[in-house]
Amino acid sequence: MRPYIVIKQILDVMMALIGILLLWPFFLIIAVVIKLTSKGPVLFKQKRLGKNKSEFYILKFRTMRTDTPSDMPTHLLQDPDFFITKVGKFLRKTSLDELPQIINILKGEMSIIGPRPALWNQYDLIAERDKYKANNIKPGLTGWAQINGRDELPIEEKAKFDGEYLNLLSLTFDFQVFFKTVYNVVKREGIIEGNKQSRTL
């Protein structure tokens, strides 16, 4: 195990705790708005693959109707806008729907930086990541592939970036990915849903 992996785990917990303390008012406001504007639970849970392909349930604020097809990436839906709620569009546009994944980080299921966790049935992506041993580390809230094209990337290229992240893993590189993620969220770059510019995994 690289020495930085231990440091990375400590930093993940520390930053997640700070995030919870600073952002809990937003959690509360978002939860209330979701509950008042659409039927269904506040949180959305979906089976994903974690480190060494272990299964866990990723948490997000629910942005879609409860009759949305399950276990399907949003960008593969025929008409994503039909299923996304009005509040959900704003949450996805600002990436605020991802905030509950701080809980996944505190539970040790995810890291702040790492390959985005694949759906359990994304067999092509999982197989490609195996080639680069990218399934051997914790998935992240954001990652190297996300700041290099995200949904615009074909599976093979996305997995290659995930493998590159594993080889380049360091504190400096994680900070680089983090700040570039913030920039991309503000600019809304590399994001696709269906045939339209929006948000996905």
Image (cartoon, rainbow, N blue to C red):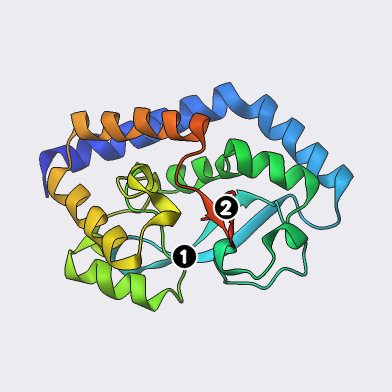
Q: State the residue in front, 196 or 27.
A: 196
**Displayed quadrant of residue 84:** bottom right
Residue visible at 61% across and 60% down in the picture: 45
Q: Residues within 10 Å of mark 2 (few under 14, many from 20)?
A: some
Q: Which residue is mark 1?
A: 48
Q: Position of residue 33 (x, y in %)?
A: 81, 38
Residues packed near mark 1 inside 10 Å, few (<14), some (14 to 19) or many (20 plus):
many
156 lies above or below 175:
below
Q: Residue at x 19, y 28 (%)?
A: 172
- The picture quadrant where one finds residue 74 is bottom right
The one of 179 and 197 positioned closer to us in this rendering: 197
What's the amino acid at mark 1? Arg
Q: Which residue is mark 2?
A: 59
The percent coordinates of residue 29 (x first, y second) are: 76, 31
Secondary structure category for the residue under label 1: strand
Q: Position of residue 189 (x, y in %)?
A: 46, 40
Residue 96 in view of the camera: no
Q: CA distance from mark 2 to mark 1?
A: 10 Å
| Residue nearest the observer in this picture, 141 or 79 | 79
- The amino acid on which the numbered mark 2 sits, given as a three-letter code, is Leu
Looking at the image, which residue is at 43% across and 73% down?
122
* Mark linked to residue 92: none
Q: Earlier in the sequence, mark 2 or mark 1?
A: 1
Can residue 16 be spotted in the picture?
A: yes
- Judged from the image, the secondary structure of the residue bearing numbered disc 2 is strand
User: Does residue 55 sit above or below 92 in this rendering?
Assistant: below
Task: Determine the residue positioned at 62% across, 40% down.
Answer: 93
Give the residue at the far top of this rendering.
22
Q: Foreground residue, 175 or 55?
A: 175
Count of marks placed on residues: 2
The image shows residue 185 at horizontal and vertical percentages of 49, 34
In the displayed structure, does residue 61 sit left or right of residue 65?
left
